[in-house]
Image (cartoon, rainbow, N blue to C red):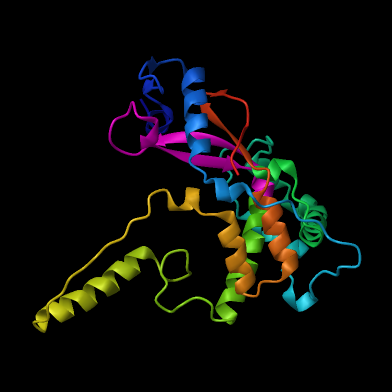
Amino acid sequence: MSKSKTREHVSPLLNEVVDLVTEDAEKAELLNAFFASVFTAKASNQEPQTLEVGESVSSKADSPSITEDWVRDHLGKSDSHKSMGPDGKNPRELRELADVIAMPLSITYDMSWRTGEVPKDWRKANVKPVFKKGNKEDPGNYQPVSLISILGKVMEQLILDFISKHVEEKIFIRSGQHGFTKGKSCLNKMIAYYDIMSGWVDEGRAVDIAYLYFSKAFDTVSHNILIDKLRKCRLDETTVRWIVNWLSGRAQRIVIQQRSVQLEACN
């Protein structure tokens, strides 16, 4: 069995009444319900944001740079071997058509940002469960890997680049921050940390180390807290509104061996 096929295989799972579920469709339903249940209640309280009459968008200096060249470049660099998202757009075809669709897409992305409207297809995900460790019959030991719209992913990258530039220029990120920071991986942090600790030990100091681990931290972060943090970082309200709407009305469905279930809300 190939490595890719092994990753897609899901063992029989135990349901809530401790019965083994063996059919792929039933396993997909079980995992879909479990993954959706992980999200916190507070994460779903954001209401979709609209542009009020008379409310202006941010100044040009506060807006992301959405150009035809930028869109063409990112489509051209996309991995053509990636799986399609729920919208059925083939990444290889999008890459080959980059010169043709870059201009209309740049207009679409700009309008999406300015109005805060996020297409439904960009908020859907096909999820492949990947086993982590432990008992293979426990749904909690599977990690959801989301396959989303390639076009939506390009827009997400554009917003990410804009936010990263903003927080770096405004110095909202501490110099000691590692992970999800350009040039500062978690491995870099561990090496620097080990160097400091071993230095203290060599000096004869008493050293106590405490580690904190947040289980499912990315899945359970409150959207309310996230949006509040973005506003405290003085991110422009147009971008904040887009993010609120991007986080609202999200849905996912589990796909196992080409079998899928109905979309499940996962705000």
Q: Quadrant of residue 108?
A: bottom right
For the point 62% across and 62% down, which residue is it?
Answer: 227
For the point 67% across and 48% down, which residue is it?
Answer: 248
Q: Give the extent of the magenta segment.
A: 124-152
Q: Residue furthest bottom?
A: 203
Residue 240 position, x and y percent, is 69, 63
For the point 16% across and 75% down, which residue is it?
Answer: 198
For the point 45% across and 78% down, which residue is it?
Answer: 174
Q: Residue furthest left?
A: 204
Q: Quadrant of the C terminus?
A: top right
Residue 220 position, x and y percent, is 49, 49
Residue 7 position, x and y percent, is 40, 33
Q: Quadrant of residue 140?
A: top left
Q: Is residue 258 toward the left or the right of residue 162 in the image?
A: left
Which of the two residues, 73 or 24, is positioned nearer the viewer here? Answer: 24
Q: Quadrant of residue 81?
A: top right
Residue 144 painted magenta:
yes
